[in-house]
């Protein structure tokens, strides 16, 4: 709107200013010529009767009208009347170019530099004619600066009008743009809500025809997406529930067969079968959990990350000790990076901050990382937990990551080079951890730690708050 208005104003006002300049110039010249002709008519009678006093008093009015100085000279160029007063009466102006031309019977208008006044002047001279002979001359001189000032004042008025028009136009444009953009802002808010996981959000159908069409298309797309995701989640959940019963029955039958067999080779195979059933059961449980991570009915609350770390350490310490591991909650990051002994557990770091999330989701997230760390840690080693600021770190002393491994470890069913040697691994733990972290505005990363082992870090964005509260 501003560009269009500026172009329109410039396109109109520049020609208008040029036309105004020409009109002012012509008006000044015509006014000077009219005043000079009027005085010349009167001067003809005065020169005949030689009543200079009458002519002197008459010049005041025309000079004021012409906004300049009027002088009358006789045929020799001597001043016989002057609107500026009697000081210059008797002065010889016969050398002035406009006076010369007028005494020769010509009417002239010229612009020249005045040597006495050091200013640019517009001089208009007409002859005083008697029987076809010039018996004197009338000269009107005007300051060109006055004409320029008049033009500048006129241009300033045009500029002010242009600014006023631009201001009014911009205010009108702002109102129009706001009316046009309001549906787009609401549409953007709806799209952001859908992107954050609220698949029930719908864009209001409003605005122009195109905007309404876009809103309807977006709502139809969201409906299909929501239905597809719900169907997928419902299928995984139903399949997981349905698999539990046959898996439980299969395990009972294998256990009964294991108890009855006397053949060691058969017993070994049955043990392997029980192990595979357990792994399949864990996979089913994790698939069920993964299918529920997109739901937004978890209760959000303010949580101390240090308390989350302490609770996780207490929860996993018996399992760790049963496998000859230790869970250590470190007070500083340096201790977490360097220690491999078995010091007694200490309190969570004082620097831990509070975040807004679901306590159950954070517990499950940390459980997945600790379980993964214990799984790959050698016997007799520690798993260190550390809460600092808005992040939690889980560090183990296992084989670490292979070269090139990183983001692909968070893909579902991807177990990496270390997981290949652990048949009980489902490849879903890290995927579940990332899904739960994303739900509350956090990010999970995995890298090799200094001194060996791997280090998983859960970092919450500054002041991030999401999720629904019930």
Image (cartoon, grey):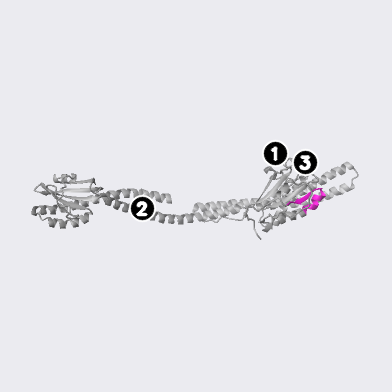
Q: Residues within 10 Å of mark 1 (few under 14, many from 20)?
A: few
Q: Foreground mark, 3 or 1?
A: 1
Instruction: Name the residue located 18 percent from the left edge and 44 percent from the top edge.
Output: 97
Kindly identify which residue carries mark 3. Answer: 421
Q: Earlier in the sequence, mark 3 or mark 1?
A: 1
Could you tell whether 76 is left or right of 170 in the image? Answer: left
Numbered marks: total: 3
Secondary structure state at the residue bearing disc 2: helix
Q: Is residue 322 magenta?
A: yes
Q: Is residue 261 something one can see in this rendering?
A: yes
Q: Position of residue 133 (x, y in %)?
A: 10, 46
Magenta-tinted stretch = 315-330
**Do the residues under discs 1 and 2 have CB atoms within 8 angstroms?**
no
Q: CA distance from mark 3 to mark 2?
A: 82 Å
Residue under circle 1? 403
Cβ atoms under marks 3 and 1 closer than 8 Å: no
Q: Residue at position x 18%, y 50% from top?
A: 139
Q: Quadrant of residue 61?
A: bottom left
Disc 3 or disc 2, which is closer to the eye?
Answer: 2
Local secondary structure at mark 3: loop
In which quadrant of the rendered image does the C terminus lie? bottom right
Question: Which label number is shown at residue 159?
Answer: 2
SS at badge 1:
loop
* Position of residue 396 in the picture relative to residue 25 (left or right): right
Furthest toward the top, the residue is 403
Q: Is residue 190 magenta?
A: no
- Return the residue found at the far bottom: 470
Q: Residues within 10 Å of mark 3 (few under 14, many from 20)?
A: few
Label whose residue precedes the other's in the sequence (3 or 2): 2
Q: Residue 327 — which label?
A: none
- At which x and y percent is residue 416? 72, 41
Q: Nearer the viewer, residue 420 or 352?
A: 352
């Amino acid at each position: 709107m501003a560009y269009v208005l500026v172009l329109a104003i410039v396109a109109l006002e520049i020609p208008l200013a040029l036309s105004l300049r020409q009109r002012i110039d012509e008006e000044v010249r015509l006014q000077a010529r009219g005043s000079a002709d009027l005085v010349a008519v009167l001067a003809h009678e005065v020169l005949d009767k030689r009543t200079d006093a009458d002519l002197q008093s008459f010049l005041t009015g025309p000079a004021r009208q012409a906004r300049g100085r009027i002088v009358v000279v006789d045929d020799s160029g001597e001043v016989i009347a002057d609107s500026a007063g009697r000081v210059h009466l008797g002065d010889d102006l016969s050398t002035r170019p406009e006076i010369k031309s007028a005494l020769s019977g010509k009417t002239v208008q010229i612009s020249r530099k005045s040597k006495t006044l050091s200013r640019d002047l517009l001089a208009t001279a007409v002859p005083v004619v008697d029987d076809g002979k010039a018996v004197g001359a009338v000269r009107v001189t005007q300051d060109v600066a006055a004409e320029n000032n008049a033009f500048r004042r006129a241009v300033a008025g045009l500029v002010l009008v242009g600014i006023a028009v631009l201001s009014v136009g911009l205010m009108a444009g702002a109102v129009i743009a706001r009316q046009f953009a309001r549906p787009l802002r609401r549409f953007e808010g709806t799209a952001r809500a859908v992107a954050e996981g609220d698949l029930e959000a719908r864009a209001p159908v409003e605005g122009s025809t195109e905007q309404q069409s876009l809103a309807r298309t977006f709502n139809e797309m969201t409906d299909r997406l929501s239905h597809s995701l719900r169907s997928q989640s419902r299928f995984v959940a139903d399949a997981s529930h349905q698999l539990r019963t046959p898996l439980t029955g299969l395990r009972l039958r294998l256990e009964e067969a294991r108890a009855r067999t006397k053949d060691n080779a058969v017993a070994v195979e049955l043990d392997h079968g029980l192990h595979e059933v357990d792994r399949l059961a864990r996979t089913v449980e994790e698939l069920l959990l993964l299918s529920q991570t997109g739901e937004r009915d978890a209760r959000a609350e303010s949580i101390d990350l240090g308390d989350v770390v302490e609770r996780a350490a207490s929860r996993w310490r018996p399992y760790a000790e049963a496998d000859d591991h230790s869970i250590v909650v470190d007070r500083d990051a340096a201790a977490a990076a360097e220690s491999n002994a078995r010091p007694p557990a200490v309190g969570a770091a004082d620097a831990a901050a509070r975040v807004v999330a679901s306590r159950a989701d954070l517990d499950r997230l940390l459980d997945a990382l600790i379980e993964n760390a214990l799984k790959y840690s050698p016997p007799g080693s520690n798993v260190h937990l550390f809460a600092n600021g808005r992040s939690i770190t889980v560090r183990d002393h296992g084989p670490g990551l292979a070269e090139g491994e990183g983001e692909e470890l968070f893909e579902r069913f991807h177990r990496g080079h270390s997981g290949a040697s652990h048949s009980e691994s489902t490849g879903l733990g890290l995927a579940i951890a990332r899904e739960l972290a994303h739900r509350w505005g956090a990010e999970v990363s995995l890298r090799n730690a200094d001194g060996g082992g791997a280090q998983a870090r859960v970092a919450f964005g500054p002041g991030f708050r999401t999720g629904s509260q019930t």
